[in-house]
Image (cartoon, grey):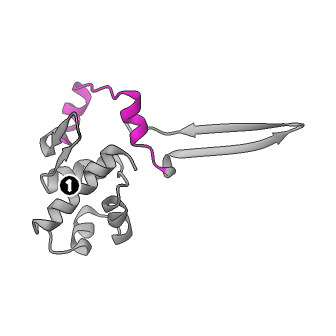
Amino acid sequence: MGRIGEAFAQALKQMLKEKKEPSIDTAAKHLGVTRQAFHAYLNGKLPRQDRLDKAMRMWKLKLDLKEHSYDWRDFGGSKQQKTSEWHQLSLFEALDTISGDDLQVNVKRTGRALRVNVVIELPA
């Protein structure tokens, strides 16, 4: 579980505690995900960028990381805003967002050797 995922989980738990949504079922429905997916987010799994943007803006969440803090205004916005502003993630921030769904490992035996192909998709 990455630091960003943990911060997102804390923000969601705080949102539920403050009763911005009556239940996990309702929150999941408003976000457009299953109850199981929402529970995964509560356990620290980071959603894809579009879901993260939607959740941050819909519930006006704030992510508190040790060295940085991001609130809902830092997420989403118009497509023109997104393309005109560049933000380069450090390698460690990018690696923090990787989940099992983003990792593909293929192993193939070629003669007496094993060929291992690893593909990591970093969310943009």
Q: Is residue 87 above or below residue 56?
A: above
Q: Nearer the viewer, residue 59 or 15?
A: 15
Q: Is residue 34 left or right of residue 54?
A: right
Residue positioned 51% across, 51% down in the render: 100
Does the stretch in magenta take in 93? Answer: yes
Query: Picture coordinates of residue 52 (x, y %)?
Result: 27, 50
In reply to whether residue 11 is colored magenta, the answer given is no
Residue 45 image position (x, y, % from top left) = 38, 54
Q: Which residue lies under the disc numbered 1?
A: 11
Q: Which amino acid is tagged 1?
A: Ala
Marker count (numbered)? 1
**Screen quadrant of the C terminus:** top left
Residue 115 picture quarter: top right
Question: Residue 13: image x %, image y %?
Answer: 21, 62
For the point 20% across and 42% down, which residue is it? 75
Across and down, in percent, residue 103 comes to: 54, 45
**Mark 1: few, some, or many residues within 10 Å (few <14, many ≥20)?**
many
Which of the two residues, 34 or 1, is positioned nearer the viewer here? 1
Against 124, is 72 above or below?
below
Nearest to the observer: residue 35 or residue 92: 92
Q: Quadrant of residue 122?
A: top left
Residue drawn at x 89%, y 37% as measured from the top left: 111
Residue drawn at 39 percent across, 40 percent down: 96
The answer to whether residue 81 is above or below residue 13 is: above
Region of the chain picked out in magenta, as a range: 75-99
Q: Residue furthest right?
A: 111
Q: Secondary structure at mark 1?
A: helix
| Front residue of this view, candidates 11 and 47 | 11
